[in-house]
Image (cartoon, helix red, strand yellow):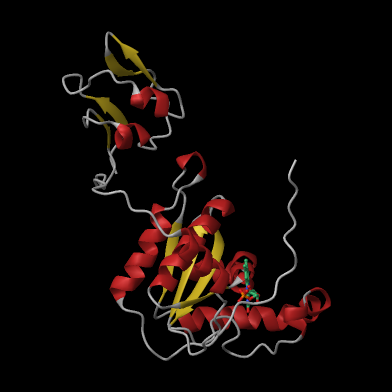
Amino acid sequence: MDKLQVVVEKNKCIGCSLCVKTCPAHNLKIQEGKAQVILEDCLFCGQCEAVCPRKAVTVSGYDHAPQEKNKEERLNPGQVLNTIRFRRTVRQFQNKPVPTEVVKQILEAGWMTHTAENKRDVSFIVLDQEKERIEKLAVNLFRKIKPLADLINPLARNNVIDDHFFFFKAPLVILVLAEDKTNGLLAAQNMEFVAEANGLGVLFSGFFTMAANLSPKIKKALQIPKGKKVAMTLVMGYPSVRYLRSVPRKEMNVQWK
Ligand SMILES: Cc1cc2nc3c(=O)[nH]c(=O)nc-3n(C[C@H](O)[C@H](O)[C@H](O)COP(=O)(O)O)c2cc1C
């Protein structure tokens, strides 16, 4: 990727100031009726480019150009809520591979997700040929630390750590890495939505995530770059279980003040 730079094409700019009002870093001003970059001290979030009615402002240096939004698309709120209501963690999978184009869509959902300060610190590892070897490393680790985990976690206490303890024979495992865990988790949630929209079931594996972050051996095997952590591990595949209803929940805890 080249050096990032906000560029205003003065001949196209109509001085509408939409970019100035939108820039979260207050890095644009109107001078002599045209937008002007103040300091190059910005997040390079591209909002100035996304809002400009004349394509006068661009952020150069990125690998991908923006896409035009040709129509207003709005999801049905009831359907969105039902997606959340009826989604269930899946731990039983069909022995059926996930097509590459679906995997790419899931990855794009993660990559498109917003990040704090537009840090864009999220990256992915798709476990393919290495899946079983890596799972074995985590299984060995957990067998060692199980007695301690049993004391604090009921899920651990009642589980036998078999060879498929982490990935449940799922065909697809994607690790979401990030410097800032929140960014990684946001990406992971959007990835789950796209996975579900493609008919997949998903498990958020906190256990594998913990193992990967704890064990230097697993970190090395995964070649996790310095400064990054596994924010979440998504275990995915076509479900071999069908949930017929939502689950009971406590009353919502909300304060209106
Ligand atoms: C952050 C997070 C980590 C989780 N880690 C695991 C895990 O390591 N193993 C597992 O079997 N389930 C894991 N789960 C799934 C929860 O146990 C699950 O949400 C719970 O069983 C309720 O089921 P539901 O998701 O269908 O509502 C995790 C869920 C979340 C949100």
Q: Which image quadrant: the C terminus?
A: top right
Indicate which quadrant contains ligand 1.
bottom right
**Total marks in image:** 0
In the rendered image of this protein, does residue 249 appear above or below residue 31? below
Q: Give residue 246's position: percent from left, percent from top.
A: 60, 77
Q: Quadrant of residue 106?
A: bottom left
Q: Give residue 165's position: percent from left, percent from top.
A: 60, 85
Whether residue 224 is visible here, answered yes or no, is: no
Which residue is drawn at the image coordinates 53% and 88% (left, top)?
Answer: 92
Whether residue 256 sits left or right of residue 38 in the image: it is right
In the rendered image of this protein, does residue 87 appear above or below residue 93? above
Q: Quadrant of residue 47?
A: top left
Residue furthest toward the top? 32
Whether residue 132 sits left or right of residue 96 in the image: it is right
Q: Nearer the viewer, residue 213 or 250?
A: 250
Whether residue 50 is visible here, answered yes or no, is: yes
Q: Which image quadrant: the N terminus?
A: top left
Which residue is drawn at the image coordinates 58% and 90% (left, top)?
Answer: 163
Whether residue 6 sits left or right of residue 224 in the image: it is left
Residue furthest toward the right? 151
In the rendered image of this protein, does residue 169 appear above or below residue 224? below
Whether residue 248 sits left or right of residue 72 in the image: it is right
Q: Give residue 78's position: percent from left, percent from top.
A: 49, 63
Q: Nearer the viewer, residue 94 or 64?
A: 94
Which residue is drawn at the image coordinates 29% and 20% (left, top)?
Answer: 16
Q: Give residue 56's position: percent from left, percent from top.
A: 22, 27
